[in-house]
Image (tube, rainbow, N blue to C red):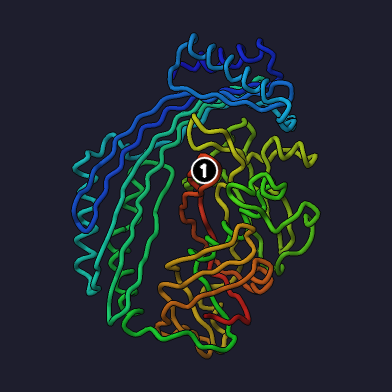
Amino acid sequence: MDTDLADFAVTFARKNGCEYAEARMEHAESDAYLLKNGIPQISGFDETTGMGVRFLHQGALGFFSSNALTRTHLREGILNAIRKTKAALPLASKVSFAEEKAYQKTYRVRQRRPFADVSPEDKLAELTSIDKALKQSKANVISSFFELSDTIHSKYLVTSDGARIRSEIPRVSFFYMMTIQEGGRSNQRYWENANVGGFEAVKRWNLAETLQSEAEALRKNLLDGRKAPSQKLDVVVGPQIAGIMAHEASGHPMEADRILGREAAQAGESFITQDMQGTRIGSDAVSVVDDPTLENTYGYFLYDDEGVKARKKYLYKKGIIDEFLHNKETAALMGVKSNGSSRASAYDREPLLRMSNTFIEPGTYAKDELFEDIKLGVYMKNFTEWNIDDRRFQQKYVGAECYLIKDGRLTDQAVFGPALEITTPQLYGSIDACGKDLEYHPGNCGKGEPMQGIPVTLGGPSVRIRNLRLN
C-alpha cells in the first residue's frame, strides 16, 4: 500500500476547509472453500485495496471511498464529497468528536503456519476429512455445509489530529451447518470456529472429532429426548449459550449509539437509557466484559478505526450497569472519553460503534458444582436457534444438546428442544453462579446500512440460572 496517499488525502481535506479528516487505507486478501453434502462448491479468491476518507466540514460529517488510488482521483473525490456535505448542511446534524490522545503505533499478528504455505488442495482435503468423519457417525445426517476461509487484513489509519496506526491481522475460520433426522424428528446445528493467527489454529480445533461427537449427541437427543418438565426449575447453560447472551443481551444494549436512538432504523434500539448507568441490572454474580486486546480472539485489535487505544471495559460489573460502548462521537455527546469501540468492515464503509470480544466473566465454581444443589433442572449445553427483539429486552434460546439434572447430578436423560424465554433483567437477575470453564467462540456481528459484518467473540463460562419455566 502506498500509505503516502492516505497522508495526502488528510492534508488535502484540511486544506479545503475540513476541521477534521481521517484516511483509512486497507488491503485484504482472502480465500474460501466450500463443501456441500460432501461435494466441493465454488471456491473464492479475493483481493481488494482501497481507501476511505471521513471528515467534518462545518460540523457535518462526510465520507468518501475509492479503490482508484491516484492523487488526481482522490482530489476529485474529496472535493465532490465536500460539495455534497456542504449542500446537506441545512439538514445535517452537527457532529463533534471527543478529544483523544494521538498514537503512532505499528502492530502485526504472526502466523505460525502462514496461509500461503497451505495449498488449495490441502485446504479442501481438510474439509473432506471432516465430511468423512461425520459420515462415520451413527447419525442420519441429511445435509451438511462446511466453509473454510482465511483473510489477511492490512490497514493504515492517519488522522488530522496526529494518529498513525499500522496493523496486519490474519484470521482463519471454519463454519459448519448440519441437519440430522432420526425417529421422525429433525434438528439442525450450526457453529463457527475462528481465530486470529495462521492455519495452525485449524488443527487445534479437532474438527473431525468435534463434528462426529456433536452428530452422535444430536442423534441421542432426537431418539431419546423428552420434553422439559413443565414446572419451574433451574437451568445451567453452557459457554456457547452464555456467549450469545453476553453479546446480544449485554453488548448490543450497551452500545451508546443505540442508547441515543441513532440505530433505531437500522440495527435497533436499546431498553437501556443513559440515566440507567450505575443502576442494577443483575445479581452480583454477573460481570460482563468487552475486551478487544485478548490475543488470538476473533475480535482482536489494539487500536480502533478512529485511532483510539483499545482497552478492557466492564459493561455490567457485579450486576451494575458500568460503562457504555463509545466512539468519539457518542463520547462527545455524553461528555466522556471514547473507549476505542469504532470499527469498519472494509475501506468503503464508515466506522461504526461495535463490540469486540464480549463475555461473561468466569466465577469460582467447577462445572459439576453448578449441578450439586439443583433438585430438578436442565443443562443446555448449546443451542440450535435464538432470537431477540430490537430493544434487546425479550429473548429466546432453544437448546440443541440438553440433559436433565436431578437430585444434584447431571443425568444422561436427553431433553428435546427446551426453549428458554426471558427478559434481560430477569436473565441477569436470576444468575446466582458462574463456572470456571470460560470459553471464547467467534461470531460475525451485523450492523449498519449498508450492512457491515464484523468479527467478534462471544464468551462465557457455564452459568446457573434459578427458578425458570422452559417451553
Q: Relative to 154, does residue 11 appear above or below in the rendering? A: above
> Residue at horizontal 35%, vertical 53%?
175
Q: Relative to 451, does residue 349 appear above or below in the rendering? A: above
Q: Can you give x and y, in whole percent of width and height, for residue 65 in the image?
A: 51, 24
Position of 234 compared to 222: left or right? right
Of 72 and 207, which appears nearest the observer? 72
> Residue at horizontal 72%, vertical 57%?
272
> Residue at horizontal 61%, vertical 50%?
290
Per the image, the residue denoted by label 1 is: 300
Residue 253, image quadrant: bottom right
> Residue at horizontal 29%, vertical 71%?
180
Q: Can you give x and y, in whole percent of width and height, for residue 463 in the image?
A: 57, 70
* Crowd around label 1: few <14 · some 14–19 · many ≥20 (10 Å): many
Q: Quadrant of the N terminus?
A: top left
Q: Can you give x and y, in whole percent of width and height, for residue 405 in the image?
A: 49, 85
Tag 1's secondary structure? loop
Position of 70 compared to 266: left or right? left
Position of 94 compared to 466: left or right? right
Any part of residue 161 in sight:
no
Q: Can you give x and y, in whole percent of width and height, for residue 462 in the image?
A: 53, 69
Q: Amino acid at mark 1?
A: Tyr
Q: Relative to 184, does residue 161 appear above or below in the rendering? A: above
Residue 281, image quadrant: bottom right
Mark count: 1
Any part of residue 153 in sight:
yes
Position of 343 compared to 402: left or right? right
Q: Relative to 395, does residue 150 appear above or below in the rendering? A: above
